[in-house]
Image: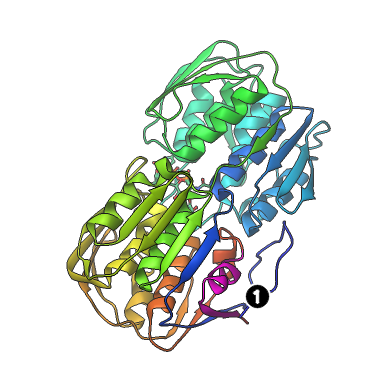
Amino acid sequence: MREQTAPLIFTSSRDDTKLIIEGGRPLEGVVEVSGSKNATMGAMAAALLVTEDCYLENVPAIGDVGHMAEVLRSLGVIVEPTSEHGLRLNAANLTQSSPPTELVGSLRASFLVMGALLARLGAAGCSPPGGDVIGQRPIDVHLAGFEAMGARVSREGEKYVAETAGLRGARVFADYPSVLGTQNLMLAAATATGTTVIVNAAAEPEVQSLAALLNAMGARISGAGSHTITIEGVERLRGITHRIIPDRLEAGTFAIAAAITRGRVEIRGVELDHLFSLIAKMRESGVTVEEDGDKLRAWCDGDLRAVTVQALPYPGLATDLQAPMAVLLTQARGVSYVHERVFDNRLLYVGELRKMGAEVVTTGTTTAIISGPTPLIGSSVRALDVRAGAALILAGLAASGRTEVADVYHVDRGYERIGEKLGRLGAAIQRV
Ligand code: EPU
């Protein structure tokens, strides 16, 4: 069954689209991974720093790209598709220094405009950003960093407002290695006067890819990928053509889908380094994972074994793969522990999983204890956020009978044509 192909930029606004899955079919075949959602967010924001064209390639056709495009357009940026997965952005004529609150509410990454606009215009405003309901999501790392670099930050009504006569390099301590916080400070610091050092920076591949993009623009950033990033401010940046890195979270989701359906899938176009923690945990639980250049093959012939999983900042296991891993562990023999150590409320999907027959209990809001294996039974469930939704799709693929996943717009925010891709691997999945 095929779903309709979507154009590059579509807005996965709230609607009542559902995915209907007839479970129990092993996934077999080859799937190509799309560009990374979260790397695309930083790359789009970086276009605000320059007056020249920026071309992005390998942009995923997902809802959040559409949302970010709307945020940037509200500031006067031209954002237009150049191909199925290409974008041109031009920020030569910025008309606003602050996006409307209603646009910012739909997307956490919209707050990245703060760092870039502050650098470019010396002024920026933005409401506290929206995003998934997965726990407290403060922005103190971003704001304290801007202040350390000489910006005045205040609250005007619902918006944070930052102003500066010129950002100055500073040594900044991040209370937490926040991914967007680190990216925001890199955007702000690239053209500041002097050198900025971010101590306790996030090391995620999406941070590394933004550093590479900014360096291609002419910035001087070193240390990305470690927890200390140094940014020597430069006077001027220029337009670039940049290829978005593969989405490690989509790749991981497909690897887990192969294992949980007892199928065999080759995932092409991956960056294996970015998947090291996931591959280690999948192997520990009994999945065979073959690494081959930019390809990963995953399958599972024998029994799955219970393991302990901890979601942590990179290079720990990604919090965004915590729910998919938990679904896999419902099929593992023994008692598995899943500890979410990044967000304080990212186990809400457990209630949905229980409807399908999973034996999962939570202690507090950050530990799930899973007893398995339990047969999953097709049920009506809701996608609560992008990753929880993907996890429930995996559960539906493994379950007997028919699963209806409602609120699938959450999943469309971050996964390109997930139903179509799974359908090509043999899943019986339909969008209604
Ligand atoms: N935190 C602070 N202070 C801050 C910022 C964050 O204490 O100023 C804490 C948060 O409370 C949270 C932890 O840091 O407990 C992690 O938050 P972080 O700021 O690193 O997350 P984020 O930058 O808002 C990005 C991704 C998320 C991903 C996290 C963690 C984007 C657009 N989003 O969010 O992706 O889960 O990093 O890796 O890059 C997703 O794709 O589904 C998704 C939610």
Nearer to the camera, 272 or 170: 272
The magenta segment? 417-430
Q: Is residue 426 magenta?
A: yes
Q: Position of residue 326 (x, y in %)?
A: 31, 65
Q: At 60% across and 21% down in the image, what residue appears?
A: 190
Q: Position of residue 395 (x, y in %)?
A: 39, 75
Q: Residue at x 53, y 15 (%)?
A: 169
Give me the residue at 64% from left, 39% from top.
243
Helix, strand or loop at disc 1? loop
Q: Which residue is mark 1?
A: 3
Instruction: Quadrant for the N terminus, please.
Output: bottom right
Left or right, 148 with reference to 160 = left
Identity of the residue furthest to the left in this view: 334
Determine the residue positioned at 68% across, 28% down. Answer: 123
Towards the viewer: 312 or 334: 334
Residue 426 location, x and y as percent? 51, 76
Residue 151 visible in the picture: no
> Tag 1: residue type?
Glu
Residue 333: name its quadrant: bottom left
- In the picture as drawn, the residue positioned furthest to the top comes out as 194
Q: Is residue 263 left or right of residue 420?
A: left
Pick the front one: 122 or 194: 194
Q: Kindly give the residue lying farthest to the bottom in the view shown.
A: 401
Are there few (<14), some (14-19), or many (20+) residues within 10 Å of tag 1? some
Residue 170 sits above or below residue 160 on the image: above
Residue that sits furthest to the front in the current view: 292
Which image quarter holds the C terminus? Answer: bottom right
Count of numbered tags: 1
* Residue 94 painted magenta: no
